[in-house]
Amino acid sequence: MTMGTTTTQAYGESWYWDNRYANESGPFDWYQKYQSLAPLINLYVPRHSNQHHRILVVGCGNSAFSEGMADDGYDDVVSIDISSVVIQAMQDKYSDRPHLKYLQMDVRDMSAFQTDSFDAVVDKGTLDSLLCGSNSRQNAAEMLDEVWRVLKDKGVYILITYGAPLYRLHLLRESCSWTIKLHVIEKLACEDKSEPPIWELTNPVPLNDDGSSAEELLGNNPDVHYIYVCAKDNSLKPGLKRETSVD
């Protein structure tokens, strides 16, 4: 679907999403469904009977992603969206599943959440959406600051995006103190394929300082979504170099 410039500039505005969800029926998952990403989520947010994880899904829309997490054993999933229309719809839909919480909230101001209160934040297209809109850099910086704030130390921000390392690494590094690993998944991962994947989902892609190593390995413009697993590290003081994985 082709979007005009005026439309994409409104991606950071609640009225755009209210209008869209008021006229959209049925669930829609941006980029990937939970089943495709489950092995990676399980890797970085392991499910243990004696360990409780609180997970935040930002820009949830009417996606079934949070439901998929709950069905997979995650028992404390909080989902937020800027649209009051879609949040009301999701609250009604999951009224019989109280452990699935839906709240209307702007990801750039999550002051309703305490600092260091989540073990993981999952973002499937929300940062991309802000980067398409007006005041993109400021909005993205505000969002990343808030994501970092609400995460516990060593908590992970899992960013699923179309943005290659050449376009995302600098933004992530300049925002907060992250230790970053990169994974990739083919865009049509949900479909049955006879050919092996371009890269195994759970294996980190070697990542050098400028991100060029990923392009050298995967080729130019590979048909993948990039997944940045950004671990919050309070030991990295502002101004020190952020770490990237070179597994």
Image: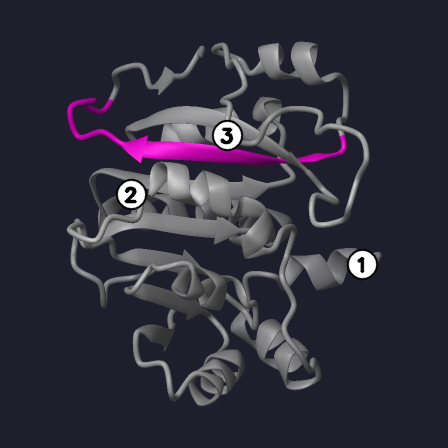
Q: Is residue 21 magenta?
A: no
Verify CB contact (< 8 Å) between mark 3 and mark 2.
Answer: no
Q: Where 146 sits versus 194, above or below? A: below
Image coordinates for residue 53, horizontal then vertical, percent: 24, 53
Residue under circle 1? 4
Q: In percent of the image, x 65 and y 68: which residue is there?
A: 28
Q: Is residue 33 visible?
A: yes
Q: Which badge, 1 or 2, comes first in the chain's sequence?
A: 1
Q: Is residue 242 left or right of residue 215?
A: left
Q: Which is more N-terminal, label 3 or label 1?
A: 1
Please tell me whether residue 228 belongs to the stretch shown in magenta.
yes
Q: Quote the CA–CA distance across marks 1 and 3.
A: 35 Å
In which quarter of the view is residue 114 placed? Answer: bottom left
Mark earlier in primary sequence (3, 2): 2
* x and y percentages locating residue 94 in the rendered image: 43, 83
At numbered mark 2, what does the secondary structure look like: helix, strand or loop? helix
Helix, strand or loop under label 3: loop
Q: Nearer the viewer, mark 1 or mark 3?
A: 3
- Residue closest to the eye, 155 or 240: 155
**Residue receiving disc 3:** 202
Check the picture and name the quadrant holding the C terminus: top left
Give the SS element for disc 1.
Answer: loop
User: As displayed, is residue 26 above or below residue 192?
Assistant: below
Residue located beneath label 2 in the image: 148
Identified by mark 3, the residue type is Thr
- 22 horizontally vs 142: left or right: right
